[in-house]
Image (cartoon, coloured by chain):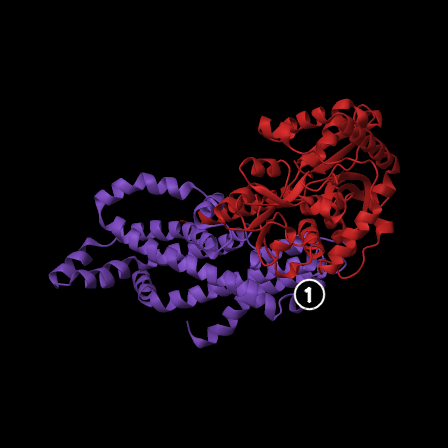
Chain colours: A red, B purple
Amino acid sequence: MSRTQSRRIQALALAVTAVLLAGACGTDDNGSTSASGNTKVKIGVIPIVDVAPIYLGLKQGFFTAEGLDVTLETAQGGAAIVPGVVSGQYQFGFSNTTSLLLAESKGLPLKVVSSGVASTGAPGKDFGAVVVKDGSPIKTAADLAGKRVAVNTLKNINTTTINKVVRDAGADPSTIKYVELAFPDIVPAIAKGDVDAGQLVEPFLTIATGQGDRQVVSNYAGTDPDLTVAMYFTSQDYAKKDPEAVAGFTAAMARSMEYATSHPDEARAALNTYTKIDRKVQQELILPRWPAAIDRDSVQLLADLAKQDGLITEQPDLETLLP
Amino acid sequence: MNISELPRRALVALGLPAVLIVLWWFLSANSTSFFWPPLSSIVEAFPRTWTADPILHDVLPSLARLAAGYLTALVAGVAAGTAIGSSRTLRALTEPALEFLRAVPPPVLIPVIALFAGYTGWTAKVIAIALGCVWPILLNTVEGVRSLDEVLRDTARSYRFGRAATLWHVVLRGSSPLIATGARQALSIGVILMVISELFGANRGLGAAIVQFQRGFAIPQMWTGIVLLGLLGVTLSGLFRLVEHRHLAWYRGLRQAERGV
């Protein structure tokens, strides 16, 4: 290679780098106004049964009625959605309660604006439970002590609630060996015997029991029959900047939850719009409860459990976090 | 290289990192962003985060899995590469299959490997690392063995070298510069796969620890993990250079003689 050639290549490489760097610093359109005069908002959600009401509410026009022009974006989980909301990529997000408590205790400026999903309160008929292989010696929550249990995230709502029901059953949960696996992988891991038990939520719970797995304990209902499992939230900045949009979101969300509760068949059908799910499973799965109100006591309980398990060192400030 | 050059070389090697660290320190000093904490708070969190327990239960197991997977890939890659490189028929037969397998990214295979090797143990993770590392080693070995000078082989034959001696002194020696190139590429792939394999069905390990810090919003700790990964990468690459320097001294001499330096 001649000297001029290598100079050219260097210049080209520099130019490419510059373009890449420029592209990496994109801009956010946070809550601008659309052509129709509505406020544009992006909402980060997780593609699970829990968020069916928001899809129904969009279809019913509850959000447009509040002057909101909504775009839904799906993400992996609360850990990905929280940074998105804090940085202004999303105006609103959906996350489980424990993640929000962790974020609050670390000083992230979040504000809850609506309840998200709650336990049905009926043990054995809840949307989340710990399951084992048919024929497993594990019969009760107390038998989980010392076993390998798969959860979708370590040190989060599922571990703290399983620990709670095991403790309430009179066993020592500190001996449980938790393994982190994604929900779709937990079912085959139980079948193979890689783990002794696994915590699943719908639709995976119905898929697993359809393959002969057996429910051991409903960790949400067993923790608190009114457990607020997840909530919708925004950043404190956005709540100050656009209180009207926040109030509109809260109102539209309340109507959506109410509608989903009174039209369960439509809630089931809404699953088709954002997940690929077997028809039979869709008809059989247990829907969660969608109460419009947040159960403050259950949020406090989750905070206490997080502190007890050492996920947080100090009590989060629920006054700041909750509406 | 003579002794008087050493300080200058050290300056050149450490100059850019030092400038970058100083830049990072001052540019992030007044950062109020939760996810981009000042470097000072990352440095301050480092000793608190990586105490004896995480080093023993996260870092060392990760490195052990990396070593096991990488060495497996090295042995398998060199063995298979030598066989394929030495035989025209074998090369023609295996080429399409190798290209196919090489095109499948190992991260995609991790869940599949787990189905066979178990979700939670070491096996699946070591296999994933080995599968990712083996390709550059294998393909470079094939290339190295193929491009051996025929005269060398003939010379070995006329000196009545045995099979083993020819393999060791002529074939492996002669292709070692290319094998080293493949092994260096494989090392960086190995570090990446060490982290990725722990994002799946793990509860301890360096990769798993970084993800858990991120999920618990322990952001300075998450950055210490990323910095630690970088430091490990630099250390491993330094070790590799040391080994390579010793074993390829003859090759450097040859190259210099050819260039007439």
Q: Nearer the viewer, residue B258 or B151?
A: B151
Q: How many marks?
A: 1
Q: Nearer the viewer, residue A76 or B153?
A: A76
Q: Quadrant of residue B254?
A: bottom left
Residue B5: horizontal and vertical position, in percent? Answer: 47, 73
Q: Secondary structure at mark 1?
A: helix
- Confirm whether residue A33 shows in the render: no
**Residue at image coords 81%, 26%:** A62
Q: Residue furthest bottom?
A: B3
Q: Quadrant of residue B202?
A: bottom right
Left or right for A197, reference B238: right
- Confirm whether residue A234 shows in the render: yes
According to the image, label 1 marks what residue? B45
**Residue at image coords 79%, 29%:** A256
> Callout 1: 10 Å neighbours few (<14), some, many (20+)?
some
Q: Nearer the viewer, residue A68 or B187?
A: A68
Residue A266: horizontal and vertical position, in percent? Answer: 71, 24
Tag 1: residue type? Ala
Q: Chain of mark 1?
A: B
Against B95, residue A159 (above or below) is: below
Residue B82: horizontal and vertical position, in percent? Answer: 27, 53
Quadrant of the snapshot with the C terminus of chain A: top right
Residue B246: horizontal and vertical position, in percent? Answer: 36, 69
Against B186, residue A209 (above or below) is: above
